[in-house]
Image (cartoon, helix red, strand yellow):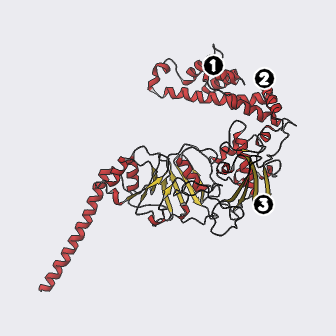
């Protein structure tokens, strides 16, 4: 009987302990919720092998051809391979072309360079990885390299430097369509004195209309800001104030007209006269005007006399040779770009590798626009969806670096302003990884016993000159051993994202 009572007593104590543990955890979680003002997600509904992250600050639109912020670079790194390979400190680390390709080679290309002291010319040989493919399985080779080099030269035009100041031999002659540069420059300048109908049309669309569109948006913003009530109150609508500020005809009235009608009327008033627009915007359009004049001039029959860049030659199916002005260190500038596959961004119909290179000379706007709407390169992932809230990436099964451990990456466009919001999202399992700026406040939040963040969130510092120098990750989901021990801006987690694992 005593044994029975003792057994019953022990069982009662055991269940009592379990009860205390349960309520203890509940109270801790309840207190944690109150401290963070967060709603904790009880069940995570996501596809297996998926990670949610914030890669850092990003703009509304960006592309491998035009990007500025570190967060944008982080995203592009997952989708495109850079022609240049760097070590953790940023030094060029591509193997020489003379070295044989091995299975473990994951770089996009082998690159060799030699310098002619007498001619002051560097010769760069670039050979693509035989396993370099797009997500659709198309091989990326010498044709793709030609497309990329010509595309960047054409986009930069004659006023900008596509390769950090390094000039390819014959680059300027190709852009002007003539070997007699001085004569050609004068011809183009003369074409501006009395523009052809085609040039007038381009000047109106590319400068007058675009600039006035921006000015109209600025006028609209004034009506949304009470600070400018003294300016906006005398006018019924933005169109009226816009007409007052920008109508070239001083007696023009917007009365009884729609905003579109007013805008179109004012554009017609300026016609193609970009210099009239400059008077009201205080902008200098000289470079843009010269680029437009050059482009229109070269479209005239018989004017484009140079169809290719002398210093770019295709050696074989995977190799090209480039001659550039400058010393051996020019390789770091000449080859530092994301590889855009010809099949995804160019046109095979206008590619012959001799006189046409995947696009119409002087017409690259379409490629630039497309490159901001989809990221389909040779990286570990490619885009399934891009919108204002998130960028969804799918695994590239043909990635030369090996198929990624992760199946899907969802990049949220958070652009955090408060450290508290970052901590809450990680605690609530709304985010697995966040790249942010390391601050004292962030450290205090993570160490706070009230939020219990210290055992749920881990922090790794990134060796970088960028402001966003801190990797935060959720310990219960991100597999810590799969994160590189040393992180830099050149050896970031996004460079090796295909090796990252999660605890499903």
Counting from the top left corner in percent of width and height, residue 11 is at 20, 77
Residue 317 circle label = 3
Q: Nearer the viewer, mark 1 or mark 2?
A: 2
Residue 93 circle label = none
The answer to whether residue 465 is above or below residue 107 is: above
**Dot 3 or dot 1, earlier in sequence:** 1
Is residue 160 visible in the rendered structure shown here? yes
Residue 60, quarter of picture:
top right
Q: Residue furthest top?
A: 251
For residue 501, side relative to residue 455 (left or right): right
Tell me the quarter of the image containing the N terminus: bottom left
Spatial CA distance of label 1 from label 2 is 24 Å
Q: Nearer the viewer, mark 3 or mark 1?
A: 3
Report the front residue among 21 and 127: 127
Q: Which residue is mark 1?
A: 247
Is residue 364 visible in the rendered structure shown here? no
Q: Residue at x 62, y 58 (%)?
A: 93
Q: Which residue is mark 2?
A: 193
Counting from the top left corner in percent of width and height, residue 163 is at 67, 45
Q: Residue at x 55, y 61 (%)?
A: 496
**Dot 3 or dot 2, earlier in sequence:** 2
Report the front residue among 271 and 223: 271
């Amino acid at each position: 009987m005593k044994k029975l009572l003792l057994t019953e007593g022990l069982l009662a104590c055991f269940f009592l302990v379990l009860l205390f543990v349960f309520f203890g955890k509940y109270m801790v979680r309840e207190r944690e919720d109150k401290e963070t003002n967060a709603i904790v997600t009880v069940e995570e509904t996501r596809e297996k092998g998926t990670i949610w992250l914030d890669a850092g600050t990003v703009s509304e639109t960006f592309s491998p051809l035009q990007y500025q912020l570190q967060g944008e670079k982080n995203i592009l790194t997952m989708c495109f391979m850079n022609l240049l390979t760097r070590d953790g400190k940023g030094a060029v680390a591509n193997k020489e072309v003379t070295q044989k390709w091995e299975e473990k080679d994951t770089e996009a290309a082998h690159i060799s360079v030699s310098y002619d002291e007498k001619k002051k010319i560097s010769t760069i040989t670039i050979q693509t990885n035989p396993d370099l493919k797009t997500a659709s399985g198309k091989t990326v080779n010498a044709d793709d390299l030609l497309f990329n080099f010509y595309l960047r030269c054409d986009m930069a035009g004659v006023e900008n430097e596509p390769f950090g100041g390094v000039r390819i031999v014959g680059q300027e002659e190709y852009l002007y369509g003539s070997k007699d540069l001085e004569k050609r420059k004068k011809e183009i300048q003369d074409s501006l004195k009395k523009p052809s109908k085609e040039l007038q049309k381009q000047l109106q669309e590319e400068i007058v209309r675009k600039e006035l569109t921006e000015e109209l948006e600025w006028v609209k913003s004034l009506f949304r800001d009470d600070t400018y009530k003294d300016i906006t109150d005398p006018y019924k609508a933005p169109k009226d104030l816009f007409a007052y500020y920008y109508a070239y005809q001083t007696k023009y009235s917007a009365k009884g007209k729609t905003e579109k009608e007013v805008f179109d009327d004012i554009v017609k008033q300026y016609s193609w006269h970009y210099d009239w627009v400059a008077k009201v915007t205080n902008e200098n359009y000289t470079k843009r005007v010269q680029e437009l004049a050059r482009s229109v001039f070269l479209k005239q029959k018989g004017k484009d006399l140079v169809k290719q860049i002398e210093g770019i030659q295709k050696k074989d199916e995977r190799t090209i040779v480039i001659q550039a002005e400058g010393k051996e260190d020019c390789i770091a500038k000449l080859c530092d770009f994301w590889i855009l596959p010809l099949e995804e961004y160019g046109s095979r119909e206008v590619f012959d590798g001799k006189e046409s290179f995947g696009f119409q000379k002087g017409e690259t706007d379409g490629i630039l626009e497309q490159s901001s709407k989809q990221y389909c390169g040779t990286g570990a992932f490619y885009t399934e969806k891009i919108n204002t809230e998130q960028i969804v990436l799918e695994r590239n099964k043909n990635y030369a670096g090996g198929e990624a451990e992760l199946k899907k990456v969802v990049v949220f466009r958070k652009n955090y302003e408060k450290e508290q919001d970052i901590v809450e999202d990680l605690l609530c399992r709304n985010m697995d990884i966040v790249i942010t700026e390391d601050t004292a406040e962030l450290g205090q939040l993570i160490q706070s016993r009230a939020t219990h963040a210290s055992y749920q969130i881990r922090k790794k510092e990134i060796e970088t000159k960028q402001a966003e120098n801190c990797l935060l990750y959720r310990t219960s989901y991100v597999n810590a051993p799969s994160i590189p021990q040393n992180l830099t801006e050149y050896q970031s987690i996004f460079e090796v994202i295909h090796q990252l694992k999660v605890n499903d």
